[in-house]
Amino acid sequence: MSIELTEANFEEKTASGLVLVDFWAPWCGPCKMLGPIIDELSNEIPDVTFAKVNTDTEQKLAVDFGIRSIPAVYILKDGEVVDQFIGLKQKEEIIQIIDKNK
């Protein structure tokens, strides 16, 4: 299952290892389609942390990351952004992105 990130816990939860962060909003159609895919992956890939940021409630994080379109997914490794994509992707594409950043 994905963890919810807030401004208060973001740095702590993304500081080490590989973390996939999904910036989303409840009203976003593509976000609603991507969410279950990310939840599936979180159960299948135990060595990666899967997290979500609600851009409606965590506007400062959205601004800090320059989020202009959602869903926006960032891959962080030891706290640093190493990859990102915008929009809906299929499960296999996300697995490839994760694998190339491990």
Image (tube, rainbow, N blue to C red):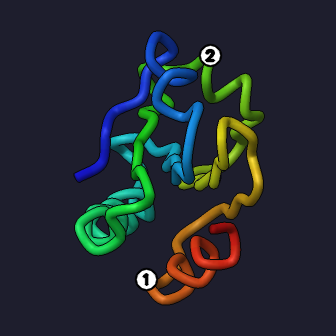
Viewer-closest of 14 and 72? 14
Number of numbered tags placed on the structure image: 2
Q: Residues within 10 Å of mark 1 (few under 14, many from 20)?
A: some
Q: Which of labels 1 and 2 is toward the front?
A: 1
**Residue indicated by mark 1:** 91
Pinpoint residue 36: horizontal percent, then vertical percent.
27, 66
Position of residue 100 in the picture relative to residue 6 (left or right):
right
Pinpoint residue 14: horizontal percent, then vertical percent.
54, 34
Residue reaching furthest to the top: 8
Q: Secondary structure at mark 1?
A: helix
Viewer-closest of 73 and 41? 41
> Which amino acid, mark 2?
Lys
Pinpoint residue 96: horizontal percent, then vertical percent.
59, 84
State the separation of the CA atoms marked 1 and 2. Answer: 29 Å
> Which amino acid, mark 1?
Lys
Viewer-closest of 17 and 9? 17
x 74%, y 40%: residue:
80
Report which quarter residue 101 is drawn in. Answer: bottom right
Q: Residues within 10 Å of mark 2 (few under 14, many from 20)?
A: few
**Residue indicated by mark 2:** 60
Viewer-closest of 62 and 18? 18
Among the two numbered marks 1 and 2 on one chain, the one whose residue lies closer to the N terminus: 2
x 72%, y 42%: residue:
68
